[in-house]
Amino acid sequence: MTDGEFGGAFRDVTGDPFDDALALANGTAPARLRSGAADGPYGARGTGPFAAGGNPGPGDAAGPHHPTGPESRRARPAGAPRPPAGHPATPWPAARETAGRAVPEPPEPGTAALGDALGRTLAAALTALTDLPSFDTSAMDGWAVSGPGPWRVARPAEEDAEPGPAAGILAGHATTEALPDGHAIPIATGARIPPGATAVLRSEHGEVLDLPDGRARLYAPRPVPPGQDIRPRGQECRRGDHLLPAGAVVTPAVLGLAAAAGYDELSVYPRPTVEVLVLGDELLREGLPEDGRIRDALGPMLAPWLRELGAEAAAPRHLADDADTLYEAVAGSTADLVVTTGGTASGPVDHVHPTLRRLGAELLVDGVAVRPGHPMLLARLAPRRHLVGLPGNPLAAVSGLLTLAEPLLRSLAARRPAAPYRAPLAAAVHGHPHDTRLVPVAYRDDERHGLVATPLHFHGPAMLRGIAAADAMAVIPPNGAEYGAEVELLELPWPASWSAGWAAPGAPYDAAAPSGGPA
Ligand SMILES: Nc1nc2c(c(=O)[nH]1)N[C@H]1C(S)=C(S)[C@@H](COP(=O)(O)OP(=O)(O)OC[C@H]3O[C@@H](n4cnc5c(N)ncnc54)[C@H](O)[C@@H]3O)O[C@H]1N2
Ligand code: MOO
């Protein structure tokens, strides 16, 4: 991590406990402790927060993916010529919009068996193929009764005189015999109501008394209104009723509804296919980090995350830091989207840009004014095939996933954009002078504001500890947001409540008291 990466976010650290905690969490001392930062071990770094290594922002000379700080493993060797002046980074909202529009039309729809439709988008409205329920149904175990009571209970001859409903009409068994007025027959929940029945009396509400003539009579403590505990045919829908519009995502509940409504297969859009290429010779796939090598955190994270976004993602491929290997992997891929991790900067083994040039790819987004993740990129390999280059720092990669891959996959899967969601911040968050910040937050109930987004610690570009406890990423506009300010939230594709325990007040991930705003 560089001071630039951190300093922009907390440019005027004032000794506030929240900022200090975050500074420590991110391995960067608060301003008052680092007065000598400009003369660090690698020499003069300038005094501005982005003087070294950071994205200088639109209009500044160095581009976002031209690292100049010496901490970078891939930084230019000392004395190497500075990279040429770069273009301004794409503003964050524009980058998302470009990614969302990269694919002009939805793909060709097809049909899928119910078992293979989960997570896909309906290409046609779901209309009921049957009435639901498809017959008048008993809502309770008890007796189907006809007219006012008491009722003669129809019992099979071999039945003993045990009180309560005996075998009668069971679910899945139909009777066409009409129930005469003044008669009752035991019936199970879900069984078809016999013709002539006017209501159902629950088993716990009726009493069967044996008469001297050997017959049984059913009594109810109070009158039974007609229709009681009968689910009439078509109560939920009539055949042909519109149940869901085209464009709805097939969730487990949609699968259940479709099956109930008579479907064996659905008209859906195909899942976009994604190939994940993990770059970096320093990455280990098992065991503990050693000898300067670290565990690959992105391979295990990205494929399942992409699947949650509706994509079909195979296990990631790990590639050596070698230009030809990367070229061959991208050129040979047939996936709708190739996602690379690492190698987006301009160090000696950062091969993503040169590979894209060699492939003749069109760079749609090359650097985004967002922290973390500013070196992310989006390129068109062919009219409907794209590459998203995620930066290697793990939280920066998440930022790229949410900024570029998510909107692109949404249009490839013909999913509708999520309705924008906003909530007030539970603590002030300092902003970058030019760039948007994405900060992991957890939802919490607040006496004053209701549901609030609490910024989490451990949100440095190389850290996953914050996002792993988060419900969403808060979009912090340039210059920051005050306590209570409503900010846009990028929700994560899993239930928010999963992190609730982690983010409970007083838990280790709890942010310090709100700062910078009215209490
Ligand atoms: N002089 C400068 N250096 C850097 C700048 C800069 O502006 N000037 N930008 C920094 C930023 S911001 C980022 S982000 C990274 C982007 O670098 P790359 O996309 O080329 O990524 P790498 O150099 O390959 O890796 C960066 C970092 O992340 C670690 N990494 C990579 N892959 C994984 C993985 N699968 N799992 C866990 N960690 C991973 C890698 O070891 C490096 O530590 O550049 C900065 N440098
Ligand atoms: O801060 Mo970098 O932007 O880690 O992506």
Image (cartoon, grey):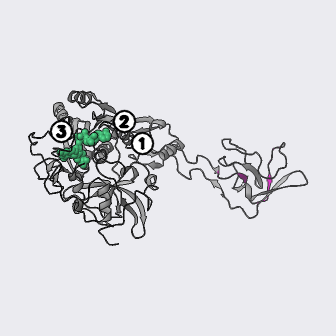
- The percent position of residue 255, horizontal first and vertical second, equals 49, 43
> Can residue 145 be found in the magenta stretch?
yes
Q: Is 224 rendered above or below residue 468? A: below
Can residue 275 be seen here? The reply is no
Instruction: Residue under label 2, please give it.
Output: 313
> Can residue 336 be found in the magenta stretch?
no
Indicate which disc residue 119 carries: 1
Query: Which segment is the magenta one?
Result: 138-156
The first of marks 1 and 3 along the sequence is 1
Which amino acid type is shown beneath numbered disc 2? Ala
The secondary structure type at the circle numbered 1 is loop
| 340 sits left or right of 56 in the view | right
- The percent position of residue 297, horizontal first and vertical second, equals 35, 40
Can residue 155 be seen here? The reply is yes
Camera-nearest residue between 452 and 248: 452
Ligand 1 has an atom within 8 Å of the beta carbon of the residue at disc 3: yes
Camera-nearest residue between 514 and 123: 514
- The residue lying at 42 percent from left, 69 percent from top is 447
Is the residue marked by circle 3 packed among few (<14), some (14-19), or many (20+) residues within 10 Å?
some
| 174 sits left or right of 515 in the view | right
Indicate which disc residue 192 carries: none
Q: In which quarter of the image is the C terminus?
A: bottom left
| 248 sits left or right of 87 in the view | right
Q: How far apart are marks 1 and 3 (CA)?
A: 39 Å
Camera-nearest residue between 220 and 506: 506
- The percent position of residue 222, horizontal first and vertical second, equals 74, 64
Q: Is 247 rendered above or below residue 19? A: above
Indicate which disc residue 347 carries: 3
Q: Nearer the viewer, mark 3 or mark 2?
A: 3
Q: How far apart are marks 3 and 2 (CA)?
A: 29 Å
